[in-house]
Amino acid sequence: MPLRLDARSPGFAGEFEAFVSARRGAHADVAGAVAAIVADTRARGDAALIDYTERFDRVRLTPETLRIGADEIAVAKAQVDAETLAALDLAARRIEAFHAKTELPALNYVDETGIGLGARWTPIDAVGIYVPGGLANYPSSVLMNAIPAKVAGVGRIAMAVPTPDGVLNPLVLAAAERAGVTEIWRVGGAQAVAALAYGTASIRAVDKITGPGNAYVAEAKRQVFGAVGIDMIAGPSEILVVADAGNDPEWIAVDLLSQAEHDPHAQSVLITDDSAFADAVTAAVDRVLARLPKAEIAGTSWRGQGGVIVVGSLDDAPALVDRLAPEHLELAVADPDRIADRVRHAGAIFLGRHAPEAVGDYVAGPNHVLPTARSARFASGLSVFDFVKRTTLVRCDAAGLAKVGPAAVRLARAEGLEAHALSIAQRLKG
């Protein structure tokens, strides 16, 4: 059974804080193993990629077969039925439409001193996206990572996807083509991240790496950060559902399990103001689990990481939501906006009884790459902003420098930086 808490009980505050701060996820230390793989790939390039691919994915490659070619993509796409391709295209169009509405406002003005100030946005030149392979095949993640990059104007999008035992997922390749991926490499793991970060004879280095992966991929992203940018270090998925008794308990049960089926360490939490409804949802979870293909994973997640919290009033929910800062927040209540307006920390919010989180994973439009592990307190979901950078502009003539320069000279000398001071002072002398 998941943890059950009652906000009206005397010990609730301490129990809830313990629940919030509990560690989730696999805690094995992979830093040393990843560092060795990254260093080896950086040193040996393609040869290391070929060796690790044979070792981990049981596929023997050559420098010529590292890249998945256009012919293979065409063959794979032909294996996907028309209805699925149509669904993929619908998702892609909606993701494109949403991200295309992102405004990157240029800034250009002259202040009261006559100094011109501004800022401009330019796209990153090259991005690498990592896509899991093997048991986890997520064409939706291809769309969510590649399309915002394309909309932002990124010219080169390189995708790394492992192919265990040589198996290619046709829909993943179809999604890559639809999203505008410019090259696809059949490599995975920490070695793929290292290749994207530092380059090899075959794979040119990129400027930023995005996309989910296992503990080795996440650690590799952490280690190469600085040489390249990264999107985030993603943890197990999370969903928090705030629901009242006006819902069908089975709907809410399925919503909770929609994230639990990802990973035994995923977390699903229900907040409700009705104890009987909480009981009904808990019972419904057991019924739904019995028919899920991934029942073992989902059940382990629900029993080990899940939580059911009963509050005296739904007005108490926003404060609890902000402490949890969930990746996904469903507000399955009569007036979702009333609660949403008071929530400050959530990766994505789904409003109303007919807005399940799963619609956001595929076809809603906003990105499903979202901050986990309470990082919604300071981070946002993937967007066009992740694929551009801002450059500030300063235009200054002699009159403007005369007005602000003396203060800069004084501050530079207060910091003991005489060359800074002189670079301004000599211009003030004319």
Image (spheres, helix red, strand yellow):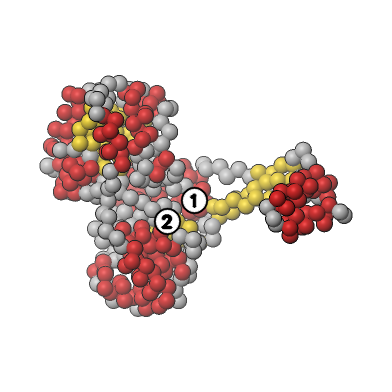
Q: Give SS at disc 1.
A: helix
* Count of all numbered marks drawn on residues in the image: 2
Mark 2 and mark 1: span between their CA atoms? Answer: 9 Å
Q: Looking at numbered disc 1 in the image, what kind of residue is underneath it?
A: Asp
Q: Secondary structure at mark 2?
A: strand
Asked whether 40 or 380 is in front, the reply is 40
Quadrant location, the N terminus? top left
Q: Nearer the viewer, residue 123 or 240?
A: 240
- Residue drawn at 69 percent across, 55 percent down: 416
The residue nearer to you, when weighing 30 against 98, is 30
Circle 2/circle 1 CB separation < 8 Å: yes
Q: What residue type is disc 2 on?
A: Thr
Q: Residue furthest right?
A: 430
Q: Position of residue 62 (x, y in %)?
A: 35, 78
Report the disc number at residue 386.
Answer: 1
Q: Position of residue 101 (x, y in %)?
A: 51, 41
Question: Measured along the vertical axis of the image, is residue 426 above or below residue 66?
Answer: above
* N-term mark: 2 or 1: 2
Q: Residue 210, labelled with which disc?
A: 2
